[in-house]
Structure formats: C-alpha cells, structure tokens
Amino acid sequence: MSTPRRKLFGTDGVRGEAGRFPMDAETLRTVGTSLTTHLRERLGRAPVIIVGRDTRESGGWLEQSLIEGALEAGAECQSAGVITTPGVAFLARTLPADAGVVISASHNGYQDNGFKIFAPSGRKLDDETECLIEADILVGTEEKSPSPNTGVHLPDEDLAAALRSRYLDFLQHEIAQGLTLNDQTIVADTANGAASSLGPPLFRRLGASVVAINDKPDGRNINRDCGSLHIEALQEKVIATGADMGVAFDGDADRSLFVDAKGRFVDGDATLWVLGKYMHDRGELSNGLVVATVMSNIGLEIALRSRGLRLFRTDVGDKYVLEELTRSGAGLGGEQSGHIIFPRLSLAGDGLITTLCLLRAMRDERKPLHELTEGFKRYPQVLVNVEVREKRPFVEVEQIQKLVRETESQLGDAGRLLLRYSGTEPLARVMIEGHDQAMIEAHARNLAMVIKRTLGAK
C-alpha cells in the first residue's frame, strides 16, 4: 500500500526543526544534488549557485551540507555567508548565477530553519523544479532517521564579504541614489538576524545617526522578543532617544515594520498607504493599483479609495502578491506583515529597500512619518475559529450563504467579511471588519454558530 504524497514546499520554501527531516544534513545534501542535477539538465553545463544564511546556530552546517551536495553534482558554489534573503535574490539576479539558496526560517525561533530557492530573475524557483526536488527528497525518506551535524562550513570570507558589499553598494548607489539622511535619527531593531551587519551600516553610509538594538546575534537569540514580531522595545527606544523613526526587521530581513516619532506602530498596510500615495503623485503607480492580500485591513481599501486608488486582494502569501503584480503591471504590493514588493526594483520583498523608499518619501514630502500616515484608519477586526468535520465550499451551504449575504448588506462599504478554511487545521475562520466593534462581534458569533451547526465537528 503506497503512502500519500507529502508536500514539503509551501509558499515560502521549506521549514522545520533543525536536525530533523526535512531540515537535516542528509536532506540538505540531497537538495544541493537535486537542484544542481536539474539545472545541469536544463542548461547543458555546470550551474553557478549562490548560497547565504541567517544567524541561526544551525545555519553553518546546513549550508555546508547543501554545498557538499551541489559540489558533488558538479555545481560551482559561492557563499555570501550571513546575508538577508533578498540579498541572495539580488546576487542570483546580478552576478549572474543560475540559482540562489538561502538557509533561513525567517521569523521563526532559532530551533527551526528552512530554505528558499531563487531563480536568476530574483523570483522564487518555479513550481516544476520544486516538484522535481521534492520528489528527490522524498525518495526513501521512510528509512531516514534524524541526522544532526556538528560540522561547520567555513566560507571564503573574502568572497563572502565582497558579495555582501556588492549588495550594500546596490542599496546605497541605486536604490538610495541621491538620498541623504544627515538630519535623521533612526532606531534599527535587526532581530539579531541577517540585517544586523547590513542595516545599520547602510543607514550610516547615507548620513543617518543610527541607534541599533538587538544587533548582537549569538546563534540562539534570533527573533527572541525582538524584531518585527515584538515591536514594543522599538517603540520605547524611539521615544527614549527622540528618534525620527524606528524600523524592525525579521530574521532574514525580507520584511520591515515601522514606528513613527510619536512611538506609534506603522504596519504593512500603513506603509502601503504612504508609499501608494507617494508613488501615485509621481506617476509611478501603474493604473492607480495597489496589490495586497485578503488579510489587509479594510481601512487601507477605504483610504486608497479616498484618493481615487484601487486595492486588489490576493490569497495570503507574497508569492500570490508577486503573481498579481506581474499580471497587472502594478508597481506596489505587499502584506500587512511588512513584506512589501516594488517589482521595478526587486521581485523579492526586501525590508531594507522598503525602509529606504519610506525614508525617501519622508524627505521628499518634508513630513514626518506620523503625518504621512494620516488618512489611514485601522478598522476594528474580529476573528473567530470554528472546528469543522469537513471543508465543504461555503457557497454550497445555503444557511451560511444566506447569512453571509445579510451580513455583507449590513456592513456595506464600511465593512468586510472573509470566510476561509485553515490550510493546515480542520478550522473555518470567520473574519469581520467594520466601524463598530460590538456589531462585528455579533455578526461573527452568528456566523460561527451557523457554521458549527452545518459543518461543525461531531
């Protein structure tokens, strides 16, 4: 009897506990071999692969394992050492190389790790090649046991430093061209991650006074009570230092969240609002369109509408945001989490690029961040989970559809209802936004009761 096929690649690569399948040394070696083999078949020559990692203690031996597998299959590998995820995507695009692999679990704790693979375009690897690599990984996995590794890969430090410098030069001279920050004080929370040795030096190159916090990685403190998931320390530091703004990155710095000079939190939705207006005023926002996901607050949609701009929503995941940006030709998209994409600058979300673009908007508009966010009002939101026995399409259940229509009618243009199933758990999620907290809570309870009655677990 055959076992069901497992799916390893999600919308953001592969993640798991370091030392256990699929984030063990043997699997990473297979990834290196498989990627090289399929690239050789396609290219008819030995591929060039760029590798980088974040600051987790497992990063070194996982990187070593991947490189060993790639070298055995005939690849040429260049390691940038500790570098951001978008830094690897940039290097893959510009060196040129045939692929880039970053060893990182993004905002997860240090016990986890993961990998993402980029094509030469800077986009994540195509689904077809992912499936081929996944099939190679899964061959014989039932016989594999966890295989922790204590070896450490020591990259050519001169080469690694040169690759990181190439990325910083790109940010300084191309993205930040003409931007001077001599009168700005910035607090940078680098989450003890990959931005620790890149973000503060970049801002200082541009003339800013930088207060760096959580910038001393020890292999185990990445994302621990800091960075984009824990904004409180950044807020306190901005107020204490009188800084003009604060920025918090996650472990691999593909996202950034902000704090204004008053200590107020500026999330990805507010960032899209500021940059959407700024780009539109300069003729850089194609079709007056901003792309976000179904999780973005309706306040963003209403604010953009007030300026004659449109919001297009995709499924959750930067992969889907990028697909729509490519399809529509739009110039700006992102997620509430701070993962912002400027397709004309980079096809990978880049927290450092986002920060530079926001700083440029502040300078050109001659306004502090708290003034630029005016006009965006976050609407109350309620989320209710209901355990279900089956995931039937909601449109097939008349009782649910009837209540959905009634609820949406009462919410009107100043509210939003989203019903979706969890991708990993037997749960239906009811999300409602509107101007009145008590009203949306009542609507959510009513919908939850109907879902429980019709689809709920026995």
Image (cartoon, rainbow, N blue to C red):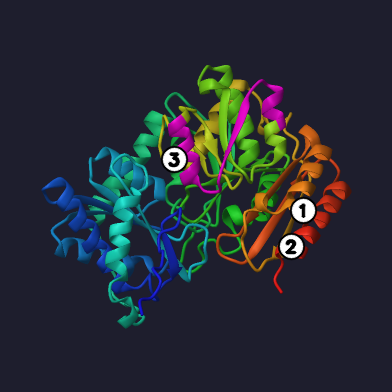
Identity, as a three-letter code, of the amino acid under mark 3: Leu
Residue named by callout 3:
202
Residue at image location 79% in from the left, 45% down from the top: 380
Residue at image location 81% in from the left, 39% down from the top: 411
Q: Are marks 1 and 2 in contact (CB under 8 Å)?
A: yes
Locate the C terminus and report the quarter of the image it occupies: bottom right
Identity, as a three-letter code, of the amino acid under mark 1: Gln
The quadrant in which residue 20 appears is bottom left
User: Mark 2 or mark 3: which comes first in sequence?
Assistant: 3
Does the magenta run of residues contain 206?
no
Element under disc 2: helix
Which segment did they paint magenta?
Answer: 302-327
Crowding at dot 2, Cα within 10 Å, few <14 / some 14-19 / many 20+, comes out as: some
Residue at image location 54% in from the left, 43% down from the top: 210
Q: Real-space Cα distance between discs 2 and 3? A: 56 Å
Residue named by callout 1:
399
Q: Real-space Cα distance between discs 3 and 1? A: 56 Å
User: Mark 1 or mark 2: which comes first in sequence?
Assistant: 1
